């Protein structure tokens, strides 16, 4: 075996020397045979011819010797590649069109695959990431809710299925001191969160369980990016004191480069040191859990164990835990979220584009193979095997595919940039998207597959060449099997209609989404956030004074028409929810208590955002905390003290309609929460409903607004309606804030139009990409129909000439050609409609206010496709009417 391999390698590497040796050996044996014949008494001429006859065909013997070396296939492959390259250079026009179509198809597929690979296929960047799960609480009314901190402690102590369980929430802290004051995204995390993720600090250490308790020394861990950006990557950052929210924290570590969990966070502080309110089991302060399954423990086993713990806690604490359970999900599934379905639809769509490109190229190569039929017939007549000819044609197809795939892989880089540019925040794990070896392997694999796909048709066709008929026609060629080319066009039309239907549904969906009334005006309104440190602004009056001074200064800026502050931000899901009961109604069961979306606002909030007043009045200067003057609050619990100043409320129209359908909500009262000592609030106004989550979502929660002068939060958003460009105001506003408090930063400065645009970013991504793919498919299909009809006209030139010579009119010829093209388009459209009805159901979760079987969309895209088919047929049909009968009768 080894000697045969060595012989083969020698024959490949030193081919000329081996061939020379073979010639010498054959000549040696021939001369020996001639000598024997001379010894037998033959003449020299007779001896020579007798030796040749005994040897047989010398060339055939040489071929047998070459076969014995085991390198014949390799040599033939090299020959095929060389011949294929010459043919591609010879037919530059065809090569250019094929490579361009493939580059677009493979490039689009590679770009989408790079997203799928980064978001879905690639494991999370943690050790044994498949063992990580995401924990929340759930009830009969709410499928997913934050975790109560005491419940988390019980889970830690009682579970038998997790190595570690940690919790975190998102917040942001004011970093002040040296340099410009800055708002830093921060995670309040338990120490076991890092253990569950199996990460460690690249510099210093992480906080311990002892530091993750009330009363411990405040410590902070920095992200690598913040360490580099703010502190210049100084190694002496450890043990330095940072002022966060007016409190001193000691830096104990820096996380590795690229680590961010949760995403877009730059600092981590111990969760166990935080507010005493967290220790109350009724509070669910935005905490979410991360746990690592023990080896061998399945998700089902973990769920069963946590269900047992939840049941025990419900028995121990019926007032707080009745009906509460634990929801466990794989962490990757939570991070990917709803984008999985989007990527599946886009991946299918871009696959259809490549299929159309393959059909188009196969048609083009079929047409070219017709002109090569004499060449192929000569090859077969000279003894070429069918497999040899098919291999030659497939080699040419694979060369085209590899060249197209190479350019497609390069185009994929721009495709990825386009995807991220269209909607940078619509895709999770976007920072991991890129072209790696998996994408390269995918591009190579799909290039080889497409090369085989579009190369099969010409290869099969070549094996049906009739040698005698082809050679007798002296180069005129035979007619390619028409049904095969027509079938490919039908496939193109059907597939394109499916893509057009999907894109049409997305267009109608996005149009309707754009027409949704958010309940407020985004025109010339900007917003930024301010979060006052609770330790510095501990008193309600301090907060009220700060924001009142800020609003006064902002109103004095040129171009400012209205300014207000609010604790909520429309279209951003930033409201807070609180239970309420109607005055005079019996207290409902705990799990059945109605909940409202709440927001604290200043009087001009409604005017700045043009939220209409439907009944009653807006807030005014009367709605403050003056009614508490002289009241002793010493005996009031800390939980009630903050809300006692509230005595009036403005509700939205849905609130009024649901609970007072007769239209008499003004003057009615509701209780803030379920505590009997909680204040009663008088309804003074009814306003229009505002979309608080996203433009495509509307919560079933009713909405209520409280006066900021009665319920002042430290973290508020500032809204400005102005006649000037918002970006020009940012610097002036920062200066006004510094004048009031030099250590106070502002952050998230943006226009409401930008916020509205961000709320529909996923829908815009779907629309843009699906429409792009559908448009590309439509162009390819138009080219495909044109190519088939043009080829058909050229094949029928003599027939058309005879028809016209016998009296056929130009209109008759035009109809004849159009009829064939429209028949193919009609058959493809019918098949495409059936496919679209079946496949667009997968888009249900991506559509807004549009049925996946919307009749208008299907009619419009079908008619549009038929119009395109007519246009594609018109040029060949018009050319057919210009045929000169005399020239046609002499055709070929």
Image (cartoon, grey):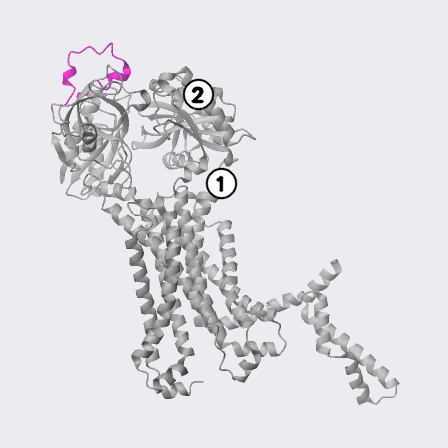
**Closer to the camera, 891 or 350?**
891
- In the shown orientation, is residue 742 left or right of residue 683? right
**Of the numbered discs in the image, which one, if any, rests on residue 123?**
1
Q: Which residues are magenta?
A: 623-647
* Residue 244, placed above or below residue 808: above
Query: Alpha-carbon neighbours of circle 1 within 10 Å: few (<14), some, or many (≥20)?
Result: some
Front residue (pair 473, 68): 473
> Would residue 21 be counted in the magenta stretch?
no
Q: Could you tell me if the residues under marks 2 and 1 are in contact, i.e. CB atoms within 8 Å?
A: no
In percent of width and height, residue 370 lies at 49, 75
Is 374 placed above or below 108 here? below
Tell me the quadrant of the picture where the N terminus can be found: bottom right
Write the residue at 52% across / 77% down: 373
Secondary-structure class at tag 2: helix
Tell me residue 791's x, y (percent).
Answer: 41, 74
Tell me if residue 635 is in the magenta stretch. Answer: yes
Relative to 613, is 147 on the left or the right? right
Q: Residue at x 82, y 80 (%)?
A: 33
**Label 2 crowd bin: few (<14), some (14–19), many (20+), radius 10 Å:** some
- Residue, disc 2: 311
Say if 511 sits above or below 733 in the image: below
């Amino acid at each position: 075996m080894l000697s045969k391999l060595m012989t083969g390698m020698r024959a490949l590497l030193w081919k000329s020397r081996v061939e020379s040796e073979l010639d010498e050996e054959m000549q040696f044996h021939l001369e020996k045979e001639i000598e024997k014949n001379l010894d037998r008494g033959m003449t020299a001429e007779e001896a020579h011819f007798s030796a040749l006859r005994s040897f047989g065909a010398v060339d055939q013997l040489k071929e047998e010797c070459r076969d014995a070396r085991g390198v014949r296939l390799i040599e033939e492959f090299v020959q095929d590649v060389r011949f294929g390259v010459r043919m591609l250079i010879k037919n530059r026009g065809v090569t250019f069109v094929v490579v361009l179509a493939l580059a677009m198809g493979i490039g689009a597929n590679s770009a989408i695959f790079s997203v799928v690979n980064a978001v879905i296929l690639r494991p999370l960047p943690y050790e044994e990431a498949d063992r990580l799960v995401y924990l929340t609480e759930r009830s009969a009314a709410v499928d997913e809710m934050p975790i109560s901190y005491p419940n988390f402690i019980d889970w830690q102590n009682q579970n038998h299925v997790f190595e570690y369980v940690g919790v975190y929430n998102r917040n942001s802290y004011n970093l002040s001191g040296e340099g410009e004051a800055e708002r830093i995204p921060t995670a309040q995390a338990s120490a076991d969160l890092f253990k569950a993720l199996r990460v460690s600090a690249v510099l210093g250490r992480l906080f311990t369980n002892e530091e993750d308790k009330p009363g411990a020394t405040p410590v902070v861990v920095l992200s690598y990016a913040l360490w580099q950006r703010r502190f210049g990557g100084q190694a002496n950052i450890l043990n330095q004191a940072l002022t966060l929210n007016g409190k001193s924290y000691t830096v104990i570590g820096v996380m590795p480069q690229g680590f961010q969990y949760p995403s877009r966070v730059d600092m981590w502080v111990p969760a166990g040191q935080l507010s005493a309110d967290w220790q109350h089991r009724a509070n669910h302060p935005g905490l979410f859990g991360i746990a690592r399954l023990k080896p061998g423990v399945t998700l089902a086993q973990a769920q069963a164990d946590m269900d047992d713990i939840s049941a025990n806690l419900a028995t121990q604490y019926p007032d707080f835990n009745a009906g509460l359970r634990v929801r466990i999900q794989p962490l990757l599934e939570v991070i990917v979220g709803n984008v999985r379905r989007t990527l599946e639809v886009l991946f299918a769509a871009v696959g259809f584009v490549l299929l159309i490109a393959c059909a188009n190229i196969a048609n083009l190569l079929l047409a070219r193979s017709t002109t090569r039929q004499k060449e192929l017939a000569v090859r077969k007549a000279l003894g070429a095997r069918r497999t040899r000819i098919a291999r030659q044609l497939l080699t040419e197809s694979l060369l085209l595919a590899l060249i197209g795939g190479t350019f497609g892989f390069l185009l994929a880089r721009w495709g990825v940039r386009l995807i991220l540019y269209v909607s940078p925040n619509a895709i999770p794990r976007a920072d991991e998207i890129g072209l790696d070896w998996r994408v390269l392997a995918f591009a190579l694999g799909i290039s080889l597959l497409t090369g085989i796909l579009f190369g099969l048709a010409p290869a099969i066709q070549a094996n049906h060449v009739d040698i005698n008929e082809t050679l007798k026609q002296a180069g005129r060629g035979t007619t390619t099997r028409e049904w095969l080319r027509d079938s490919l066009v039908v496939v193109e039309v059907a597939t394109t209609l499916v893509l057009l239907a999907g894109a049409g549904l997305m267009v109608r969906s996005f149009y309707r989404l754009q027409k949704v009334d958010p309940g407020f005006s985004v025109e010339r309104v900007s917003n930024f956030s301010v979060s006052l440190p609770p330790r510095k602004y501990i008193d309600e009056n301090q907060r009220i004074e700060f924001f009142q001074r800020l609003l006064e200064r902002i109103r004095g800026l040129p171009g400012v028409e209205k300014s207000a502050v609010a604790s909520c931000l429309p279209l951003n899901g930033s409201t807070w929810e609180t239970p309420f009961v109607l005055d005079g109604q019996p207290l409902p069961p705990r799990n059945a208590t109605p909940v409202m979306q709440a927001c604290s606002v200043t009087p001009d909030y409604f005017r700045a955002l043009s939220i209409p007043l439907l009944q009653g009045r807006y807030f005014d200067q009367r709605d403050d905390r003056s009614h508490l003057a002289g009241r002793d609050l010493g005996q009031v619990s800390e939980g009630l003290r903050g809300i006692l100043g509230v005595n009036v409320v403005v509700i939205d129209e849905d609130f009024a309609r649901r609970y007072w359908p007769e239209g008499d909500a003004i003057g009615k009262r509701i209780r803030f929460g379920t505590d009997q000592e909680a204040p009663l609030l008088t309804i003074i106004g009814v306003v229009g409903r505002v979309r608080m989550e996203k433009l495509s979502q509307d919560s079933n929660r009713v909405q209520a607004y409280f006066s900021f002068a009665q319920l002042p939060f430290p973290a508020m958003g500032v809204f400005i309606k102005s006649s000037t460009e918002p970006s020009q105001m940012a610097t002036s506003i920062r200066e006004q804030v510094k004048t009031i408090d030099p250590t106070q930063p502002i952050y998230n400065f943006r226009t409401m139009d930008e916020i509205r645009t961000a709320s529909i970013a996923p829908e815009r991504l779907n629309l843009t990409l699906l429409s792009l793919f559908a448009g590309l498919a439509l162009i390819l299909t138009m080219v495909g129909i044109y190519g088939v009809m043009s080829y058909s006209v050229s094949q029928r030139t003599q027939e058309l000439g005879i028809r016209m010579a016998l009296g056929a009119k130009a209109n008759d010829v035009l109809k004849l050609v159009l009829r064939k093209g429209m028949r193919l388009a009609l058959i493809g459209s019918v098949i495409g409609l059936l496919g679209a009805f079946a496949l667009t159901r997968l888009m249900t979760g991506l559509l807004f206010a549009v049925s996946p079987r919307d009749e208008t969309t299907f009619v419009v895209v079908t008619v549009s496709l038929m119009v395109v088919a007519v246009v594609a047929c018109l040029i060949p049909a018009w050319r057919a009417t210009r045929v000169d009968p005399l020239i046609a009768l002499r055709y070929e």
